[in-house]
Amino acid sequence: MRLFSILILFCFFGLISTDLNAGDKTKELDFARHLINRNELNEALFVLETIEPQSLSMQDSVFHLSGWVLYRQMKLKPSANLLLKVSENSPFYLKSRFFSAYNFSHINQAQKAEEILYGLKLDAKTMHGSMQNFQLSGLALLNRDFDGFEKRAEKFTGSFHAFVSEEKNMHRHYQRLANAPNRSPFVAGLLSTAIPGLGKIYAGKTAEGVVGFLYIAAMGLTAFDFYRGSGPQSALFISTASIAGIFYIGNIWGSVTTVNRQNREFNHEINQRILFDMHIPLRNAFN
Amino acid sequence: MRSTSVFCLICIFLCATHSTDAASKNDTLFQTADSLFEAGDYFVASIEYERIYYFSEDPRYRFLANLHKARALKQKGEFARARNDLQRSVTARVEEELRFQLFYEMAFCAYMSGDFSDALSLIRQIHHYFGNHPDIGQIYLTQALTYLRLESWDELRNHAGHWVENHEYANEKAKELLKALSAKIETENIPSPTEPKKARMWSTFLPGSGHLYAGEPAWGALNAFSQAFSLGIAGVLIWNGFYIAAGTGGLGMFQSFYFGGIRQAGELAERNSRSEMEQFKNNVAHLLFSIENALKAR
C-alpha cells in the first residue's frame, strides 16, 4: 500500500514535469501578450520569434500575435502574410482573415484582399457575414467598381451596431465619387492659355489662379511699358518679355499638373476615408 | 497511519522543493539578465528583467527587476519609458534604500527625458521622504541642472551654495567654481530674451533696425540696402517714364524686401534668443559638472 502511494505520487509529479515544457511555452505566450498590452511591440516580437510551437493551436497563437504586432507597427504586408497562416480551426481565424484582407487593401492589393474575403464561408445573416459584405463593398469603392458597390450596398442591413454608421459613410463616399467633377488636364491647359491662371481656378485652386494671373499680368505690363518706351529692340523689353513668356508657359504647365495633382489628392483622401471606415468595424467587432 | 505519514512527508518535501525552486529560478533569471546587461545587450536584458517582473510573485524581485529594467532602458536612451516603468513600483513595500534608488532613477530619467517639472517634483519628494539618507548628495547635481533648465536662477543659486558648503569634501576648487557660478548667474549676466514682436516693430518703422535688435547687423544692412536699391530702381524707371515698370518691378521688389525684412527680423530674434540662452545654459551646466568633479576629487 505504502509503495503504491509513493508510486502514484511520483507518477503524478512526473506527469506535471513532462507537461511543464508545454506550460512554459503557454506562459511565454502570456508574456508576449503582456508585452503587447504594454505597447512593447519590438520586445513582444522578439519573444514570439523565440517560441517553438508544440501544437497547432500554439502555432496559430504565435502567427496571430506576431501578425497583430506587425499590424500595430504598420508593417502591413508581413502582418497580412502572417495572419494568413492562422489555421481554420483557430479561434483567431476570422479575425486574422479579416485583418489580413484589410492590410492587403491598405497596401493597394485589393485583389488579394478580395480573394481572402471571398474565401470565407459565412452566413450573410450573421454579423460576420454582413461584415464580409461590408468589407467587399469598401473594396469595390477602392477599385471604383460602382456596379459592384451598388450590389453590395443593397445587402447592407443597418442592424449591426459595429458598423451601422460606417455603412452610411460608405454610401456618402460612393455619392462623392459618383459626383466627383471629372476635370481634364487638357481643358485646364487651354483655359490657362486663354487667360493665365484660369486653368488653376478650373482645377479648384482659386487663390493660386488669381496670384498666377496677377504675376503674369504685372510682368506683361512691365514688358509692354518697355516696349512702349524703348521699342521692340530694347534689351529691357526683350528681357522682361522673355521672363513674362517663361512664366506664361509655366502657368499653363502648372495648370495641367494642378488638375492631375487635384485628382490624385481627391482619390487619396477618399481612399483614406474608405479604408478608415473599413477599419473601424474590424476594431469594433474583434476587440 | 504510516502510509499517511509517508504521503504527507512526500508532499512537504515536494512543496518545499517547488518553493525553493521559485526563488532559485528568479536568481537564475536575474543572472541571465545581468549577464546580458554586462555584455551590452540592453534590448534582450530589458526583456529578461520584464520577464522576472511579470512572472515573479515576490514583490522584492519584481521591484528589483523593474529597477534593473529601467537601467537597461537608460542605456538605450529610452528615458521616458524608463520613467514610466519605474512608476509601477512606487507603491511596492521594500526597504528604504531601494525606494531611494527608485526615486533617484525616476528623477534622473524624468530630467533626461526633458520633463523638468516632473524631475523637480520627484526631487522634492526625495528630499521629503529621504532627507536624511546618506546618499542624498547623489541628487544634488540633477537638482541643480533641473533648476537650470527651468531657469529658476534664485533656486539654483541657493541650491548650489547649499550643495558645496555643506558637502563633507568641500574644497577650495569647488568653492572657487561656486563663486564663478554665482557670478555667472547674476541677473545682469543672464541673457535677456530678444522679443520677435519688438524686432518686427523696429523693422516696420526703420528697415534693418529689427535685425540689429536681433543681433544680426549684417542682415540688417543687407535688408536696408535692398530696400533702398529697389526704391532707387523704381525712381530711375519713373524718371525715364516707365511708370508701369516702376510700379511692378521697382515697387514690387521693394514690398518683397520690406515685408520679407520684417518677417526675417522676427524669426532671427526668436532663433538668436533661443540659441543664446541655450549656449548660456550649456556654459552653466559645464560649471555645475566641474563643481561635481571637484567635490568628487575631495
Image: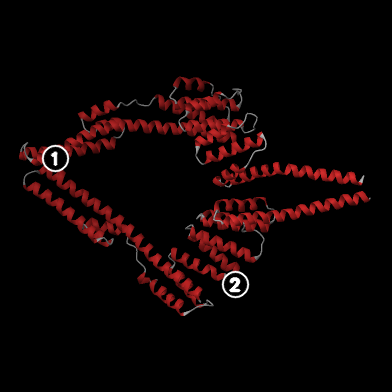
Taking the spot 60% from the left edge, 58% from the top edge, the residue there is: B67
Q: Determine crowd level at label 2: few under 14, some 14-19, many 20+ residues with C-alpha closer than 10 A.
A: few
Which residue in the protein does label 2 denote?
Answer: B134
Q: Say whether mark 1 and mark 2 are on the same chain.
A: no
Q: Residue placed at 12% from the left, 45% from the top? A: B246
- Residue under the point 24% across and 53% down: B261
* Rendered location of residue B36, percent (x, y): 58, 54
For the residue labelled by badge 1, is the local secondary structure a helix, a strand or a loop? helix
Q: Which one is nearer the viewer's eye here, B104 or A193?
A: B104
Which percent across, then down, holds residue B293?
Answer: 47, 71
Q: Is residue A103 visible?
A: yes
Q: Residue at x 53, y 33 (%)?
A: A80
Q: Is residue B252 above or below residue A264?
A: below
Residues packed near mark 1 inside 10 Å, few (<14), some (14 to 19) or many (20 plus)? many
Q: Chain of mark 2?
A: B
The total of numbered circles placed on residues is 2
Amino acid marked by disc 1: Thr
Q: Secondary structure at mark 2?
A: loop
Which label belongs to residue B15? none
Observer-nearest residue: B269 or B81? B81
In this view, the residue in front, B170 or A173, is B170
Q: Which mark is residue A240?
A: 1
Task: Give coordinates of residue B111: x percent, y percent.
Answer: 49, 61
